[in-house]
Image (tube, rainbow, N blue to C red):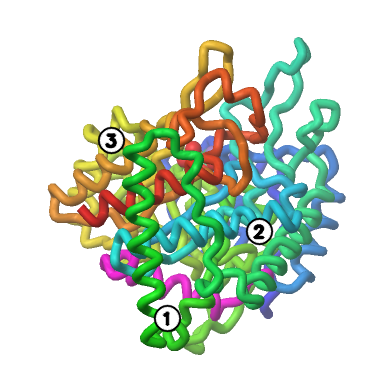
Amino acid sequence: DVRLYSVSPPSAAARSAARLSVSGERPQQPAEWTPSSWQSKPIKHDVKYSDYKQVEKSLRKLEWLPPLVTPAEISKLRKKLHDVALGKAFLLQGGDCAELFDYCNASVIENKLKVLLQMSLVLTWGSRTPIVRVARMAGQFAKPRSSPMEVINGKEVASFKGDIVNDFDPEHREPDPDRLVQAYFHSAGTLNYVRALLSSGFADLHNPMSWSLTHVRDEHIRQDFQKMVDRLRDSLEFLHTVGAAESSNLNTVDLFMSHEALLLEYEQSMTRKLVGPDGKEGWWDTSAHMVWIGDRTRAIDGAHVEFFRGLENPIGIKVGPSMKNEELVRLLNVVNPNKEPGKVTLIARYGYDKIEGLLPGHIKAVRESGHRPVWSCDPCHGNTVTTSSGVKTRKVSSIVREIALSFKIHKSLGSTLNGIHLELTGDAVTECLGGGMEMTDEDLGTNYATYCDPRLNYEQSLDVAYLLARYMRG
Ligand code: PEP
Ligand code: MN
């Protein structure tokens, strides 16, 4: 029976019992994993609903709805990430911090696709390897928050936890179970349009999209970028001339979807027992091709790690400054006991000022353990700062610095940086400082549109790709 599990959320009593193990010892890893075994584990960033009957109704509906992605697609990404882990390809993962239901819109989707495709082209040229593209999109709706409450206009209200949970409108912050189902349909709408665009030639390199560099103020940098674009165009033209482009699938691309699997009730309902392309049965989280565990929910004995360890999907783990070397190895052993290369992507996010003190220890410990993860660098989350006027922002220079340090550290230890993870948008927002357009503190007010963390805008995202490509080319 493929639907033999119950999705009933655990009672508050069961959850606190799990938190306070009776013997006072660490709870044992249960021998058997089920899609609901996470429910007996302590959980962080849990959502408390006032009406669990409505939650049940939503979860039953989700269980009934078809998968958003298939085991064949998920396996394809898993194989590609295997190559990435072995240094044969490079991972580009990016998108919004918090995706809104409203981003399920033609131009928002087109712009994000465009920036990701352009970045990946620049990076292909830079890394001389294929780029595996994974969007933070079509499901990035649940957010962990540093505080459960926030003050808006002098009034204390529950924090916005993402569109899958509550409304950004401070008057409607009560978790709404119907949003679980709405999340599915918004994911489906986004995914459908992405699939439609890609199969309609949106990625066609015969029609290169605009490669304007007029935003880059510094003459020197602009010329440098222009040289790269010219060489990239030359290479593409050459491929077309010799007919290689037509035969090498350059006009179609793969784009995989990912999100932080924070809301385990939702993820459980989307997790199905299905036969994979190898003919074996397994449990597939069909809400996305790849899902990751956030830095705040990666406790080894916690609910999220328990849920993730049973999935066939390739998974990510955010690795922040508090991660201990041996803790990282234990975590890898739990979620990837067979030590399959690339099954796990370690998304390191320390901050440019901390990476040198932390990454070397993590690299050495992981290497000694025999694990071969994808090493990705998230240069965004460790570099968030607040301006004197209280606006959350990031400097493009700090972002670039953390990536450059990550490359350097890996290289010096005989390891390889295999990918980057960025918070970005294809739209003309003003949320991060600097970049070719030299965005200043005063500019931030022009179009500060994020509902969570500050994102690189279209130009800044390409700036990062150019700088990275130049770095990779040496
Ligand atoms: C995020 O990716 O938006 C996020 C919350 O990151 P982290 O888990 O690394 O803090
Ligand atoms: Mn974020």
Between 227 and 376, the one nearer to me in the picture: 227
Q: Amino acid at mark 1?
A: His
When the figure is inspected, residue 314 is found, relative to residue 227, above or below; the finding is: below
In this picture, which residue range is highlighted in magenta? 68-90
Between 341 and 396, the one nearer to me in the picture: 396
Mark 3 vs mark 2: in front? 2
Label 3 Cα neighbours within 10 Å, binned few <14 / some 14-19 / many ≥20:
many
Q: At x 80% / y 49%, what residue is drawn?
A: 179
| Residue identifier under label 2 | 110
Most frequent secondary structure within the magenta stretch: helix
State whether residue 306 appears in this view. Answer: no
Q: Secondary structure at mark 2?
A: helix
Q: At x 77% / y 38%, what residue is drawn?
A: 166
Q: At x 25% / y 48%, what residue is drawn?
A: 407
Mark 1 vs mark 3: in front? 1
Q: Amino acid at mark 3?
A: Ile
Q: Position of residue 68 (x, y in %)?
A: 68, 69
N-terminal label among 3 and 2? 2
Mark 2 vs mark 1: in front? 1
Label 2 Cα neighbours within 10 Å, binned few <14 / some 14-19 / many ≥20:
some
- Residue 127, disc: none
Callouts 1 and 3 close, C-beta under 8 Å:
no
Quadrant where the image shows the N terminus:
bottom right
Spatial CA distance of label 3 from label 2 is 34 Å
- Residue 240, disc: 1
Spatial CA distance of label 2 from label 1 is 25 Å
Q: Is mark 1 within 8 Å of ligand 1?
A: no
N-terminal label among 2 and 1? 2
- Residue 355, disc: 3
Q: Amino acid at mark 2?
A: Glu
Q: Secondary structure at mark 1?
A: helix
